[in-house]
Image (cartoon, rainbow, N blue to C red):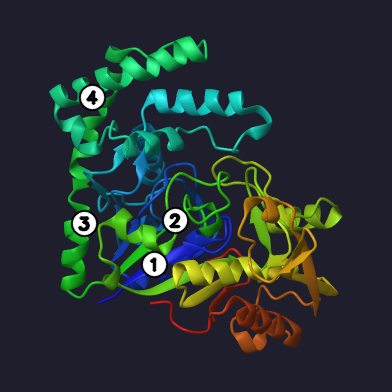
Amino acid sequence: MPAITLVGAQWGDEGKGKATDLVGNRVDYVVRYQGGNNAGHTVVIGDQKYALHLLPSGILSPDVVPVIANGVVIDPAVLFEELRGLRERGVSTERLLVSANAHMIMPYHRALDKVTERFLGKGRIGTTGRGIGPTYADKISRTGIRVQDMFDPKILRQKLELALNDKNQVLTKVFNRRGVELDQVFDEYMGYADELRPFVADTSLELNRALDAGKTVYLEGSQGTLLDIDHGTYPFVTSSSPTAGGACSGAGLGPTRITKVVGIVKAYTTRVGSGPFPTELHDEWGDWLRQKGGEYGVTTGRNRRCGWFDAPIARYATRINGITDFFLTKLDVLSGLERIPVCVGYEANGTRHDEIPMTQTDFHHAVPVYEYLDGWNEDISHARSFEELPKTAQAYVRTLEEMAGAPVSAIGVGPGRDQTLELRSLV
């Protein structure tokens, strides 16, 4: 049976939680394979809204096994707070599995993240300050602390001693900040061990056995393609690989296991944090999209930068991820526009680019080239089939589909669970 990967096709915040929730009753496992609590998914069920930051969206579906895989970095305090919040609302959390190989966010990671970002000044990346980047840096430098280390007090203390010998030097002597106390951190994380132990598993083994047994596995990324550490707008990116390739290493599955890649893309474009954004609007239309689309970060509450749909970015995401299907979200936000601009290319330093320019310099200076499509005035939030959409809305979808290079298989016309038009099955 298939492993299906869900990826953001822009800069994140495309509506991946809605897409995962849509298929929740048709899959057996929903797997978060990268990132940490620097991202969030909003899922609306009836009149209830759930903001998930670390947990997979599948935890809201009673028959799904939600998995936090090895590619995720975990702040245990955030994890337990989120679990308690769901339990208080009557959501069962007993099915959750957490990889023993996932890395832990430590207090010194958060401290370094915040102070480093302030130190960068105008060159700041726009991180959330939650310690994600420093945790991934320690993972790559082989000084990280994993979930399994909390079950061996001797190992945990040894690793903390080694880490703090370095981190406290940086905090106190470079940034003139207070150091982190070894005993305090050790006691805190040992206190998490018993509560975490029932959830911990060899998730790679579990997922491969599930596929062998004919189960369906849904791999849910956070952030988006343009924030990928290798393929995004570096250095204004996240510290992991939210692309489809990252799903393999982040979940412990071979690439031949993945049979479908679903790209989530908004009917316009948003971005949080610093970095290039060619179609960004600094006028009343940017404010209009922000207000009408509710474009505020789930995790941080920050205003999202807003702009028109960028076709070269969508094509790039199709190519990088091998996208087989698109889920187009927030089409309803565009209702009321007489004409809708769509970016079809860029002008940079006197040269026309139909694809994303190769260099950061050219992309930073890229000026969008627009085509204008007919809009619609009708309220489409009550549509329940593609044929119920206005003809101009149908044409907008088909044009974006052609420009992006993969079929649109689902369309979001509102935040609710029932406000999705499924043209083809996403499973």
Return the x and y of residue 315 as percentages of the image width and height. Answer: 58, 72
Rounded to the nearest angstrom, the CA distance separating label 3 from label 2 is: 18 Å
Task: Tally the marks.
Answer: 4
Callout 2–callout 4 Cβ contact below 8 Å: no
Residue at the spot of label 1 = 5
Q: In this view, does 383 lie above or below 169?
A: below
Rounded to the nearest angstrom, the CA distance separating label 2 from label 1 is: 10 Å
Depth check: give the residue in front, 63 or 97: 97
Q: Which residue lies furthest to the front in this view?
A: 350
- Which label lies toward us, 1 or 4? 4
Return the x and y of residue 215 as percentages of the image width and height. Answer: 23, 72
Return the x and y of residue 337 as percentages of the image width and height. Answer: 82, 71
At label 3, the amino acid type is Ser
- Which label lies toward us, 2 or 1? 2
Q: Quadrant of the N terminus?
A: bottom left
At label 4, the amino acid type is Lys
Callout 3–callout 1 Cβ contact below 8 Å: no
Q: Residue at x 57, y 29 (%)?
A: 117
Residue at the spot of label 4 = 159
Rounded to the nearest angstrom, the CA distance separating label 3 from label 1 is: 15 Å
Q: Quadrant of residue 280?
A: bottom right
Residue at the spot of label 3 = 204
Residue at the spot of label 2 = 242
